[in-house]
Image (spheres, rainbow, N blue to C red):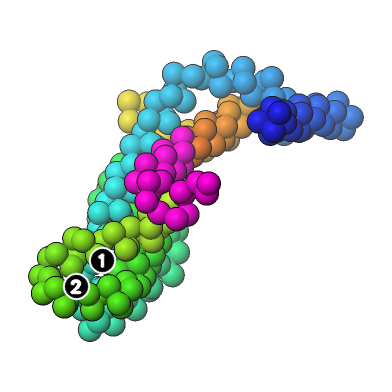
């Protein structure tokens, strides 16, 4: 019964929101170029389905590449900084400086260095995703139980054994938390990259680039449809990251083990 109720409430609220949407359009006589109906948006999405699918794949490619580079680079840098306090003090302020620099300022620089298109989009996505992973993972590596460290020293464990069997497992929940945060930001970063550095490849650009095109042509229903596609892409990306988080932690970490 609880499962049925949990499904019923979102459905009812969704139907109510759509009804309110139609009511506002009819009551205030809002033209289609300002606010299309849900039906018109779905029709536009179906009509432009091939272009939007290609756009979603391009944006998804930028999100995956930038996110993957941020995960690998962030994990490695965090591990290095965790084992060298001097290195952390040397590098962390500059990482903060990069994090605080607005992407809208960095985007033209990336375009100058890498050119218009996918490489710059990947770089923008990387910049947006990198800091949450570094901050969270570094905290994980440095939050190892001191008593366990003493046990490893008493057992004459090598540094490699300490890293493999103690520090990495201890840091894994922190790392995956950073990955989840970065996962929510990756599609946003890729779409932002489309806006700031995107280009049309074979007549089709990323979702952000296509949104600008639809806006310039006053194809408002298609513009809203591109927003819907971007939302679905974000849900798919975050859902995949959440599934990975569950697969890696559910058997042993307290936060995901079901209480009997």
Viewer-nearest of labels 1 and 2? Answer: 2
Give neighbour class at mark 2: few <14, some 14-19, many 20+ (Cα, 10 Å). Answer: some
Taking depth in this image into account, of 232 and 150 the one nearest to the observer is: 150
User: What label does residue 224 carry, if any?
Assistant: none
Q: Judging from the image, what secondary structure is the residue with disc 2 in?
A: helix
Counting from the top left corner in percent of width and height, residue 230 is at 51, 36
Residue indicated by mark 1? 167
Q: Judging from the image, what secondary structure is the residue with disc 1 in?
A: helix
Residue indicated by mark 2? 152
87 lies left or right of 2? left
| Vertical relation: 220 (above or below) 116 | above
Tell me where the magenta segment starts and ends, as one range.
236-260
How many numbered callouts? 2
Q: Residue at x 18, y 68 (%)?
A: 162
Counting from the top left corner in percent of width and height, residue 118 is at 31, 42
Q: Residue at x 12, y 65 (%)?
A: 160
Counting from the top left corner in percent of width and height, residue 76 is at 22, 61
């Amino acid at each position: 019964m609880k499962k049925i109720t949990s499904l019923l409430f979102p459905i009812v609220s969704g139907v109510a929101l759509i009804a309110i949407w139609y009511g506002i359009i009819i009551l205030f006589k809002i033209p289609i170029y300002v606010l299309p109906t849900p039906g018109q948006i779905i029709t536009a999405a179906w009509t432009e389905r091939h272009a939007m699918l290609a756009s979603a794949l391009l944006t998804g490619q930028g999100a995956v590449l930038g996110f993957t580079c941020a995960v690998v680079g962030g994990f490695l840098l965090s591990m290095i900084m965790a084992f060298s306090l001097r290195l952390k003090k040397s590098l962390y302020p500059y990482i903060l400086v990069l994090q605080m620099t607005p992407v809208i300022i960095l985007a033209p620089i990336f375009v100058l260095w890498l050119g218009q298109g996918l490489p710059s989009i990947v770089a923008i996505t990387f910049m947006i995703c990198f800091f949450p992973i570094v901050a969270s993972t570094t905290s994980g590596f440095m939050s190892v139980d001191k008593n366990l460290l003493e046990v490893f020293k008493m057992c004459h464990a090598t540094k490699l054994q300490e890293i493999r069997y103690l520090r990495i497992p201890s840091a894994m929940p922190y790392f995956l938390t950073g990955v989840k945060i970065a996962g929510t930001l990756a599609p946003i970063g890729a779409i932002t990259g489309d806006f700031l550095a995107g280009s049309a490849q074979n007549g089709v650009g990323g979702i952000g680039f296509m949104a600008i095109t639809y806006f310039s042509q006053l194809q408002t229903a298609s513009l809203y449809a591109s927003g819907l596609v971007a939302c679905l892409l974000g849900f798919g990306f975050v859902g995949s990251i959440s599934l990975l988080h569950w697969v890696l932690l559910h058997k042993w970490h307290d936060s995901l083990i079901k209480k009997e």
